[in-house]
Amino acid sequence: LTERNYTAITQKCWDYFVDLMRHVTTSELCEWKVISRPYSELQDCLEDWAERLNYGYPNALAEQYIFQSHHRYFHNCTLEHPVYFDPPEDVLLAMIIAPICLIPFLVTLVIWRSKDGKAQA
């Protein structure tokens, strides 16, 4: 019964979202300040009703509507700024260890050069 109720309500959440998105022009589809309200309304509706019905959130049905919104409205949106990811662990480890290993060498070089300078004086 809960699942059937949640299914019916999520359809109403979706219909409301689609209605809000009718007012968004194609050129505005990727502007967060324009689409954040409809998108948040959809997400809040799905989450609030899941909590009211003790259905659990996130859930498969809610995720389906979120994916559907991305597929239908936002699939052509590209990021203006590239997203940077952490390098692979082996590269990250090499980038951390290399400077650490250089420190004793540089300290030894400085001490050796300072002793060499005193001997010449």
Image (cartoon, rainbow, N blue to C red):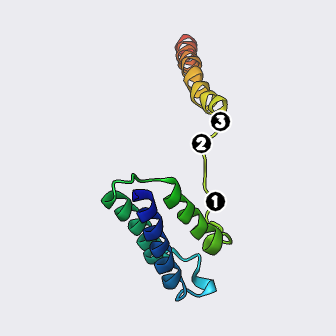
Q: Amino acid at mark 2?
A: Asp
56 and 24: which is toward the camera: 56
Q: Position of residue 46 (x, y in %)?
A: 42, 65
Secondary structure of residue under mark 2:
loop
Q: Is residue 81 visible?
A: yes
Secondary structure of residue under mark 3:
loop
Q: Residue at x 41, y 64 (%)?
A: 5
Does residue 48 sit above or below 91 in this rendering?
below
Q: Amino acid at mark 1?
A: Pro
Q: Residues within 10 Å of mark 2 (few under 14, many from 20)?
A: few
Mark-to-mark CA distance, 2 and 3: 7 Å
Q: Position of residue 17 (x, y in %)?
A: 49, 77
Quadrant position of residue 87:
top right
Q: Amino acid at mark 3?
A: Pro
Which labelled disc corresponds to residue 82? 1
26 with respect to 10 (left or right): right
Where does label 3 land, which residue? 88
Q: Residue at x 46, y 80 (%)?
A: 16
Secondary structure of residue under mark 1:
loop
Quarter of the image that includes the N terminus = bottom left
Q: Residue at x 53, y 80 (%)?
A: 18
For marks 1 and 3 on the same chain, the one whose residue lies earlier in the sequence: 1
Q: Position of residue 2 (x, y in %)?
A: 39, 58
Where does label 2 land, which residue? 86
Q: Is residue 77 visible?
A: no
116 and 9: which is toward the camera: 9
26 and 10: which is toward the camera: 10
Mark-to-mark CA distance, 1 and 3: 18 Å
Which labelled disc corresponds to residue 54? none
